Image (spheres, helix red, strand yellow):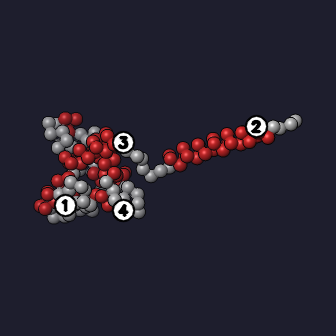
Amino acid sequence: MIVDPSKGSFLMQLRLAAIASLSCALLSACTEGSIAEPDNVREGQRVYAKECAACHGASGEGAGPASLGLDVIPPDLTGLKQRNDGYFPREFVRRFVMGRLEKDDPTSPMPDFSSVGLRHVYPDGGADGEVLETDFANLLDYLEAIQE
């Protein structure tokens, strides 16, 4: 049997291309975060402005006008990634804001949004006062986008 060297080279290149494509797909599936759509980040910014900025500040640095009347300083939300070794703790933030984690201080002024809903986003009681998953995902996308 005679093997044409040009065909072997082509098959090898095809195999390498397939392996490279598979490797890229696997690596992208393992990334820590996802790239949010700009529209989702803008919508998250709207939710943030209405529900969070009063305490955490317009830019997320923890000095909103309502924070003056609190016994605690709301945390700087732009440094979450930095305080977590370069990883944005998306699931932790989700669980904390939705009241799924026990707070260090039970008298903390941080609302449990699973109970109070997005009352400023839906002032007329839209969405039955519930936190819609898309609203909350967009909020998390925005918070991830403002990380320093």
Q: CA distance from mark 3 to mark 2?
A: 43 Å
The residue under label 3 is 37
Residue under the image location 26 percent in, 46 percent down: 45
Mark 2 or mark 4, whichever is nearer to me: 2
Q: Amino acid at mark 4?
A: Gln
**Mark 3 or mark 2: which comes first in sequence?**
2
Quadrant assignment, res 57: bottom left
Q: Is residue 107 visible?
A: no
Q: Position of residue 1 (x, y in %)?
A: 87, 35
Query: What residue do we see at 27% from left, 51% from top?
Result: 97
* Element type where label 2 sits in the image: helix
Give me the C-alpha separation between circle 2 and circle 4. 52 Å
Write down the residue under mark 4: 82
Identify the residue at image location x=20%, y=63%: 73
| Nearer to us in this view, 104 or 66 | 66
Q: Which comes before the other along the chain, label 2 or label 1?
A: 2
Judged from the image, the secondary structure of the residue bearing numbered disc 3 is loop
**Could you tell me how far apart the alpha carbons at marks 1 and 4 are, in whole angstroms?**
19 Å
- Position in image of residue 128 (x %, y %): 20, 36
The answer to whether marks 2 and 4 mark residues whose Cβ atoms lie closer than 8 Å is no
Mark 3 and mark 4 lie on one chain; the one further toward the N terminus is 3
Query: Disc 1 marks which amino acid?
Result: Ala
- Which amino acid, by three-letter code, is at mark 3? Glu
Crowding near the residue tagged with mark 3, few <14, some 14–19, many ≥20 C-alpha atoms within 10 Å: few
Residue 145, horizontal then vertical, whole percent: 33, 51
Q: Residues within 10 Å of mark 4 (few under 14, many from 20)?
A: few
Extreme-front residue of the structure: 6
Q: Are marks 3 and 4 in contact (CB under 8 Å)?
A: no
Q: Residue at x 58, y 47 (%)?
A: 23
Tag of residue 7: 2
- How packed is label 1: few (under 14 Cα within 10 Å), some, or many (20 or more)? some
